[in-house]
Amino acid sequence: MTRNVILDELHAVRRQILADCNGDTAAYLRDAQARLEASGRPISQRKQRTIRCTGAAKSGQSAMENYSSPPGDR
């Protein structure tokens, strides 16, 4: 199997990050969150949207395309 230098480097960095946190990913995430908040950069607080909110549910051109299928067809 051929080696991918980029993936090897990514895996090495991941091992180093985990070693710095004694293998505790939760500790790493807490530290990353603290560094982000301390950076002073704006942090977006967006609500998760559903497909109904995006308008994608009403993508059909005709009114018939926008009706849901009968329960037997689902």
Image (cartoon, helix red, strand yellow):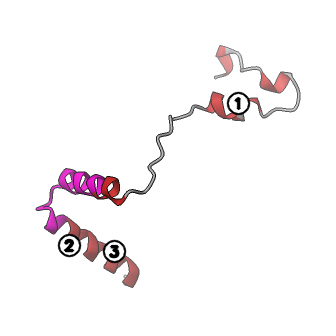
- Residue at image position (23%, 51%) is 30
Pick the quarter of the image with the N terminus: bottom left
Highlighted range, magenta = 18-34
Helix, strand or loop for disc 3: helix
Residue sitting at 48 percent across and 46 percent down?
44
Q: Are marks 2 and 1 in contact (CB under 8 Å)?
A: no
Instruction: Give neighbour class at mark 2: few <14, some 14-19, many 20+ (Cα, 10 Å).
Output: few
Rendered image quadrant of residue 67: top right
In the image shown, does 45 or 17 lie closer to the viewer? Answer: 45
Q: Amino acid at mark 3?
A: Leu
Rendering quarter of residue 50 = top right
Q: Amino acid at mark 1?
A: Ala
Residue extending furthest right? 62
Q: How many marks?
A: 3
Residue neighbourhood size for the residue with mark 1, other residues' Cα within 10 Å, grouped as few (<14), some (14–19), many (≥20): few
Q: Looking at the image, can residue 4 be seen?
A: no
> Amino acid type of disc 2?
Gln
- For residue 32, side relative to residue 24 (left or right): right
Who comes first in sequence, dot 2 or dot 1?
A: 2
Residue 26 left/right relative to 58: left
Query: Magenta stretch containing residue 40, yes or no?
Result: no
Q: CA distance from mark 2 to mark 1?
A: 45 Å
List the residue tagged with mark 3.
Answer: 10
| Mark before the other along the chain sequence, 1 or 3 | 3
Q: Which mark is residue 57?
A: 1
SS at mark 2? helix
Residue 43 point in image, percent of width and height: 44, 49
Q: Which residue is mark 2?
A: 16
* Closer mark to the observer between disc 2 and disc 1: 2
Magenta-colored stretch includes residue 27: yes
